[in-house]
Amino acid sequence: MGLFQLPTELIVYAFGFLSRCDLDSCSNVCTTLHDLISSSANLQFLRSAEIAGVEGNPLSPLGAIERLQRLNAREAAYQQARPAWVCSVPVPFQSSSIYELSGETFWLGEAGRRAVWYLRLPRVESATPVWQRIAVSSPDRHIVDFGLSVEENDLLVLATLDTEFTLRLEFVSVLTGNRHPAAKDAIDVTNTQDERCSLILEVAGDHIIVIASYPLAHRPDCVWLYNWKTGTVKFDLQAVNHTYSGAVFLSTDVFLLANAHTACFELWQISEEQPPSEPALVLHLPRLSLEHRIWELGVRGEPSPARSRAFQDRAVPFSSVAEEAIIVFRIMFRGPGPSCRLLLFIHRHALLALLSSPDVSEMHYPVWGPDICRWINMGALVPSWITIASGQRCVLSRQIRNDFILLDFNADPERERPLATVLPPEDTFSEPVRGLWTEPVASRLPCSVQFSERLSSGFEGMSLSDSHIIAMKRNQATLNIESVDVLFFG
C-alpha cells in the first residue's frame, strides 16, 4: 500500500510526530505533500509552535485553528511590546515580602505570615479575577517561604517555623488547600536557631531542593535534596557561609547550584543508586580581580522541567518548552568602588549540552561561555524581582521612564522581528566597573530588544509569565502592594 492510499487523517496524524525540518523536507517532495501539509491547521500549529518554543496543552479544548490564531496573536503582541488589554486587580489583604509567579498563577504572602494568596491570571478582559487563600495547618507556625509545582504536581510547599525554630516543609494540594495526597508526611528539615534564615525552594518531578543560609549568623550554608513524596533525603551538603544562594533544575534529574564563593556554576546529577559526592561539571565564571567578589548570585528558570503537566489549566492553549527556556542569573559584585549588578542569560538546553563533554569535570569561561551567554548591565533598571523571565523572554522595567523592555532570546531564523532591535555580539563585554575581571568577557548569545510605550501609571516592579506581565503597585504610606496591573499578551 502506498502512502497516498492511506486516509488523509492518518497521514496528518503521523506527520504530527515529525520535526519542523522533516515536515519542510516532506513538503518539498511533491505538490501533493506540500498541499497536504500547508492546508493542515494541526501541522501548521505544530510548526509554528516549534518556532516559538512552545508546546500545545493536551488538556485544552481548543482546536488547531484557534490555537494557531492565538499563538500568532501572542507573538505579534510581544514583538510590539503592546498588550492586547490591561486590567487592574486590587490586593484585598496586607501583603508580605514573599511572592511567586508560576505558570499562569500569581502568588503573594500575607502579612503575619500565616497564609499565602494566589490569583489565577485572567485570559478574558471581562473576567473578574478572584484571590484564593491557603493558610498554614498549625496556629503556632508561620511561613518563611514557599515553593510551587502547580502544573506538574498540583503542589504548594510551605516552609514554616515554629516557636522552637524547627524548619518544616508542608505539602499542600492547591486544588483542595489540604495536605497533598502524594506526600507521605511533612518533613522536618533542621533547627534554624532563630528566624534569620534565608531559604531557596525548587521543585521538579519527585524532588525538591532546599537551601538554607544565614547571612547574619555566619553559620554554614546547607543544601538538601529530598524526594518530597517519601521524605527521603537524596543529597545533603554544607558549605561556608555565603556560598549557595540559588538553585535551578536543568532537568528532572540534573540541577545547578550557583556558587558565589568560588564564582562558578555546579551541575549535579541525581542518581537513584547513591547520592553524588561531587558535581558532574563545574563551570567557572570570568576571573574576577582580587579586589572584587560576588555578593549575590541568584538564579531562575521558568518553566521548570516536568515529566508531565497533568494539572495545567485547560484555558491555557500552549506553554513554553522547559528545555528551550532561558536561565537568568542575577549577580551583584562588590569591590573598592560602587557595587554593580549584571544579568546573565543562558538557555537551559545549552547548559545540559555541556554535560556531554567526555572526561571533563570543569570548564573555564572562555571555553564554555562566549557563544551561549549574554551579559546585560542593569544600570538604571529597576532592581529585578526574581520572576522576570518565562520561556525565552525577559521583562526589565525602567521606573524613571515608566515603561518596560522585553528581551527575546529565541534566535530561530524563521522568527520575524520587524520592530525589534537585535543586540550585536560582543567579543568584549563593556565592564560596568573598571577592573572587575582579569580577562576579556565575550557575550554572543543572540538577543533582540523591544521597548514599550509609557504606561499610564507607576509601578513597583514587574514579573513575566508566558501570557502576562504583572506590574505591582505599592502603597507608599504602608509599603504594602495594593494592586497589580495584569497586561495580557495572548
Image: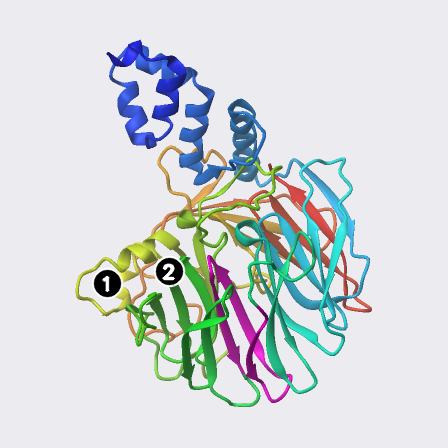
| Amino acid type, label 2 | Asp
At horizontal 32% and vertical 72% (from top left) the residue drawn is: 276
First of labels 2, 1 by sequence position: 2
| Amino acid type, label 1 | Val
For the question of whether residue 402 can be seen, the reply is no
Q: From the image, state whether disc 2 or disc 1 is nearer to you.
A: 2
Q: Residue 455's x, y, as percent?
A: 69, 47
Q: What stretch is highlighted in magenta?
A: 185-213
At horizontal 43% and vertical 86% (from top left) the residue drawn is: 240
Relative vertical location of residue 215 with respect to residue 145 in this rendering, above or below: below
At horizontal 47% and vertical 87% (from top left) the residue drawn is: 220
Kindly state the secondary structure of the residue where label 1 is placed. helix
Q: Quadrant of the C terminus?
A: top right
- Residue of label 2: 253
Kindly state the secondary structure of the residue where label 2 is placed. loop
Q: How crowded is mark 1: few (under 14 residues within 10 Å), some or many (20 or more)?
A: few
> What secondary structure is the stretch in magenta mostly built from?
strand
| Left or right relative to 227: residue 107 | right
